[in-house]
Image (spheres, helix red, strand yellow):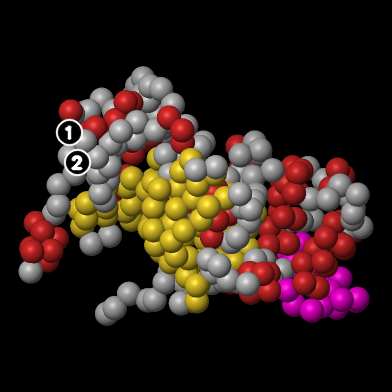
Amino acid sequence: MSAPAPLVELRGLRVAFDGQAALRGIDLSVAPGEAVGMVGESGCGKSVTWLAALGLLPGRAEISGSVRLGGAELLGAPAAVLEKVRGGRIAMIFQDPASSLNPVHRLGRQVMEALRLHRGMSGAPARAEAKRLLDQVGIPDAARRLDAYPHELSGGQNQRVMIAIALAGRPELLVADEPTTALDVTIQAQILDLLQSLRRDTGMALVLISHDLGVVADACEKVAVMYAGRIVEQAPTSRLFAQPTHPYTRGLLGALPPIDGPRRRLLAIPGGVPEPWAMPPGCAFAPRCPQRLAACDAGTPPAVPLDRAHHAACIRATVAPAIAERLSA
């Protein structure tokens, strides 16, 4: 049985600011209804990837490659086309609702604005739909909350409002950019459970951006690990946790505290993500890698297919025998 056609497909996506590369060739696909996690430290390019895909970067950004939604190219598309896509077919929620919601407008007006833009609704029908959306995302006493201002709600409730606004356009894909960073642990779990239940109810695809592999472990079927503007490892979630191949992925997993078993010292990755203007030769992770070889400085390692759905950009990665046979055929 053939795999379904991708809903969104990124190929060779590159972004540079003032000549300095921020993304260095992103290849990623999201199938209809699929949940994909994107993880890595701050500065790896996770958010820039989707801001570029949706045409939300400033004019000085130099963007190349391909972003296809349902087979239609988005890069270079007219503004009128992108306006229908943003919030309509693809919605995005951000990590800090306090800076995303307008503090001087009531919450109902902000939800109804999304309904007007993407579904042409206004008046009493729009208000009724706004109440339904707030009910759907678990806002208590939704009818009264429509007339509240953002400062009257907690951070977790405001994040739920942001999710309601994102759902207003009935998107096929929801990009959640670190939606739990500003919340306490208990509320984080509630927001993640909410996103999972919304996926089941609506059938939408989900991209969950995070710096924490633990956050995406239960929520996503596939994980893409980013470092310095590239995807360095990509695999189904269960395989990535069972057989991490790239040293950076192993470092991220080593930094996760164990839930059970004996206590152990957490591992730390020395150094930091290189700035775009100070990129080392060859593999960008080499200066921090405990398995560094002289050959790591010779060139940027390509993504090696370890299995049908598992790739790693490391010279130590070994092609699985079945894949090697297929490649040589």
Secondary structure found at label 1: helix
Q: The residue under label 2 is which amino acid type?
A: Ile
For the residue pair 262 and 130, the one nearer the viewer reads as 130
Q: Main secondary structure of the magenta part?
A: helix
Examine the rendered structure and indicate whether residue 268 appears above or below residue 231: above
Q: Which residues are magenta?
A: 118-136
Q: Give how far across and how far down residue 138 sits, in percent.
A: 72, 57
Q: The residue under label 1 is which amino acid type?
A: Ala
Report how far apart the C-alphas of labels 1 and 2 lie in the structure. Answer: 8 Å
From the viewer's perspective, tell me whether residue 210 is left or right of residue 154.
left
Q: Give how far across and how far down residue 33 sits, in percent.
A: 48, 69
Q: Give how far across and how far down residue 118 sits, in percent.
A: 73, 74
Q: Give how far across and how far down residue 258 sits, in percent.
A: 39, 31
Q: Are marks 1 and 2 in contact (CB under 8 Å)?
A: yes
Q: Is residue 124 magenta?
A: yes
Nearer to us: label 1 or label 2 = 1
On the image, numbered disc 2 is attached to which residue?
315
